[in-house]
Image (cartoon, rainbow, N blue to C red):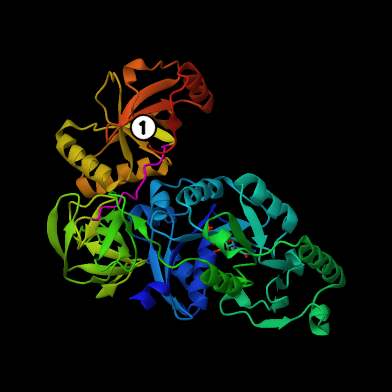
Amino acid sequence: MAAEVARRRSFAIVSHPDAGKTTLTEKFLLYGGAVHLAGSVKARRNQRSTTSDWLELEQKRGISISSTVLQFEYNGHRINLLDTPGHQDFSEDTYRVLTAVDAAIMVLDAGKGIEDQTLKLFEVCRHRGVPIFTFINKMDRPAREPLDLLDELERVLSINAYPVNWPLGAGKEFKGVWDRHTKMAHLFERVPGGAYRSPEFTGSLADPLIREKLDPQTYETVCEEVEMLEGAGTTFNAEDVLHAKTTPVYFGSALNNFGVELLLDGFLEHSTPPTPRQSMDGATIEPHHPSFSGFVFKIQANMDPQHRDRVAFVRVVSGKFERNMAVTHVQSGKKMRLSNANKIFGSDRETVEEAYPGDVVGIVGKSGFSIGDTLTEDAAIRYDEIPYFAPECFSYIESPEPVQFKRFRTGLEQLLQEGVMQGYELVNATRATPLLGAAGPLQFEIVQYRLKAEYGADSRLEAAPWTVTRWIDPTVEAARLKAPHGVRLAHDRLQRLVVLCESPWALRYFAEQNEGVQLSSLPF
Ligand code: G4P
């Protein structure tokens, strides 16, 4: 058990769309031996039959909506890579996946630096305190100065940025990286399409062969930069990485495989095996706790249109999971047997006989599970891992066809339970139309699509004006609060009071009008 836990790493790659997350994922699979020719994941995606093509909608739009869990072996490690949906309109799914990981790799485009979604996802990782590794990708394209990028990381994210390696050139002159620990330069050769491992040449900067391969200007700049790094006197502090105070930074090009292996090796060395979690009674549940326990962090319904089933993705926290084992579903108090457990790689399924902390198991066909629920052999354990995230868009939804109303209600209720979006109720509402909140507008489209495809119910959306949500100190009563123009009070599904604001300005005004009332972007 101890050995199985120690060799596991469960993480997600977070990035702004187009920074290179899919490419890097694929290169990890290539270096891990899980795919033999890079390009196959994407090519299959283009053939519309692959990894996360679970929803027809997803195929139509050619984007990845559902998360996938990829498991592969690398140098004796068992790696669980939880894929986060990457699209402009990202959803709460993306956030939730981050509750199930022990570390994250943040991918930046070297030409762009930190972008909007990188920042949001980083904040969620930091909130959870997981170690964050940074990969500065696309060094083969015109890139910003490495120092400028590091400075931005420190300024915008308030985290120490420790460059583990340093780029040898940029753009067309990008040849590889210099490793600060071994003081060795790694030069790579480009291979057609980056389809297989790039041949690598290693030597010290003084090595004439290295010098020969770099153009004189790049060589000179690199020597100066390396001297400066050495002179800066900062040392690598592994503890600071584990406590998310420092992010180790790696440079490279995922497309060309430059620096991918160094990143993966560095990540495996310095990230953490599966971590303990808090049970709601305050007990710390260590991975080697004798009883199996885990929590549902994602539910995907109707993944297989032929079977119309539901898959609950469970992150194993402690103990050994065995197929057919009897567990308690803590929220309902029911005892059940987990016979239909699967490993899911896109649309392919494989039965899981056993799983260890850090692994993700897909339980097929059980209804009654909600996001955040605990499954365990020891009914005293109960996790509270899934936070609600403040929605940034709202919409009313109604059924235009009275004959379909029952189906509409049933479908909406199930989608709410699944957590596709959040339901809100305005205080002193003047209409009974359900109000939905989501992290991105794409989620409303998914709701409409699924209501129609799975429940046969048409629906009509009407955009609501709020863009900023804050939870209000639970000791405060709604009647005591002043709600100026542009602001409404509401309750979430758990009857917690929130304020919905039309703009950040309206939120500031609300805060001024209600001085001393605590507000939070996560529930109290
Ligand atoms: P994402 O999942 O973060 O959205 O990004 P993805 O990997 O899909 O990469 C976005 C685009 O950037 C792709 O090009 C990809 O080939 C390119 N890219 C990724 N890494 C690198 C890199 O290191 N260097 C360069 N030059 N490009 C990189 P695309 O044209 O949108 O797609 P495709 O036609 O190449 O598949």
**Most extreme residue toward the left, as rendered?**
335
Q: Is residue 86 left or right of residue 67?
A: right
Q: Is residue 441 left or right of residue 215?
A: left
In this view of the protein, can residue 457 be seen by the observer? no
Q: Is residue 17 left or right of residue 449?
A: right
Quarter of the figure with residue 492 = top left
Q: Relative to residue 206, is residue 508 depicted above or below?
A: above
Q: Quadrant of ligand 1?
A: bottom right
Q: Relative to residue 317, is residue 506 depicted above or below?
A: above
Q: Which region of the structure is painted magenta?
A: 381-391
Q: Residue at (42%, 59%) from the top-left corner?
A: 101
Q: Residue at (30%, 46%) from the top-left corner?
A: 419
Q: Residue at (33%, 42%) from the top-left corner?
A: 421
Magenta stretch prevailing secondary structure? loop
Q: Nearer the viewer, residue 72 or 246?
A: 246
Quarter of the figure that contains the N terminus: bottom left
**Most extreme residue toward the front, as rendered?**
283
In this view of the protein, can residue 158 be seen by the observer? yes
For disc 1, the marked residue is: 395
Does the segment drawn in magenta span residue 389? yes
Q: Relative to residue 136, is residue 434 depicted above or below?
A: above
| Location of residue 490 in the rendering, given as x and y in whole percent from the top left corner | 33, 26
Q: Dot 1 surroundings within 10 Å: few (below 14), some, or many (20 or more)?
A: many
Secondary structure at badge 1 equals: strand
Quarter of the figure with residue 375 = bottom left
- Mark 1: C-beta under 8 Å from nearest atom of ligand 1: no
How many numbered marks appear? 1
| Location of residue 220 in the rendering, given as x and y in whole percent from the top left corner | 86, 69
Quarter of the figure that contains the C terminus: top left
Does the segment drawn in magenta span residue 509? no
